[in-house]
Amino acid sequence: MLGEVTALARGLILDFFGVLTSNMVEVIEYFEDRENLARGTFLRGWADPAGRALFAALELGQISQRDWNVGFAKLIGVQPDDLMARYLADAYPAYRVLNVAKQARAAGIRTAVLSNSLGRTPYDPYSGWDLRASFDEVVFSTDLQIRKPDPRIFEMTADKLGLTPQECVFVDDTEDNLVAAARLGMRVLLGLDEDATAGELRAVFGLPAL
């Protein structure tokens, strides 16, 4: 999906959930198992218009994480207490991708994290990651009140890196976000598998295997 790569690739922009963390399909399945929910319950709630509205409002900072906990809990039939923390309990670091990002930055590639934020309180999914020390830029949707796949957030992230969209490679696990980024001229990569993503990025930027 990445397409032809030229020497113009000078920036790497990475989604957080599902790219720098465990695959989100697996995270959701583990959550459903712990909560004794039928498989597919979470995604049906997410696909419901009310569920989509809750996620969009949270990602734009229009509601609090507590509001999301209460609203989404009703949709899927669970208790609201610390729902976000329970949902993301298995979103572990994707160390192979993180290592490639570190390797790319050391080689002079500008790096950024671009995340549709799921809130910071009462549960902070970014705590302990030290993203701002590890990447040149960290962009949360709540900071700009714009969320993926709005093309403006890709343009603003590239600009923060001092680059054009055409100079950037963007990795995400959601097709809609990749389509929007590609329309701006970004080279895009669907990042669903940690090993495959790490390997493709090394090939793109000419990085040696660790």
Image: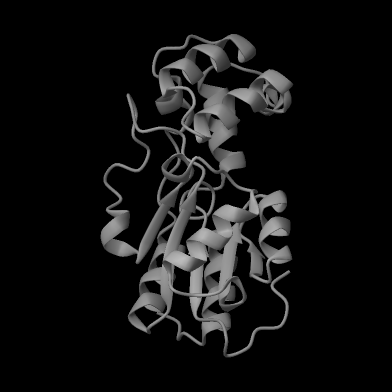
Decide if residue 189 is on the left or right side of residue 160.
right
Look at the image and name its color scheme.
one colour
Residue extending farthest bottom? 7
Where residue 76 sits, quadrant-wise, is top right
Where residue 172 sits, quadrant-wise, is bottom right
From what the image shows, is residue 22 above or below residue 59?
below
Q: Position of residue 81 (x, y in %)?
A: 40, 12
Give the quadrant of the N terminus.
Answer: bottom right
Decide if residue 180 is on the left or right side of residue 85.
right
Give the quadrant of the C terminus.
Answer: bottom left
From what the image shows, is residue 99 above or below residue 73?
below
**Most foreground residue, 24 or 47:** 47
Q: Name which residue lies at 66% across and 61% down.
A: 181
Q: Position of residue 35 (x, y in %)?
A: 53, 17
**Looking at the image, can residue 42 be seen?**
no
From what the image shows, is residue 103 above or below residue 71?
below
Q: Position of residue 164 (x, y in %)?
A: 55, 74
**Looking at the image, can residue 45 be seen?**
yes
Q: Name which residue lies at 41% across and 43% down.
A: 143
**Most foreground residue, 85 or 169:** 169
**Most foreground residue, 101 or 176:** 176
Q: Position of residue 39 (x, y in %)?
A: 68, 25
Counting the numbered discs, the total is 0
Q: Name which residue lies at 73% across and 22% down.
A: 49
Q: Name which residue lies at 55% across and 13% down.
A: 71
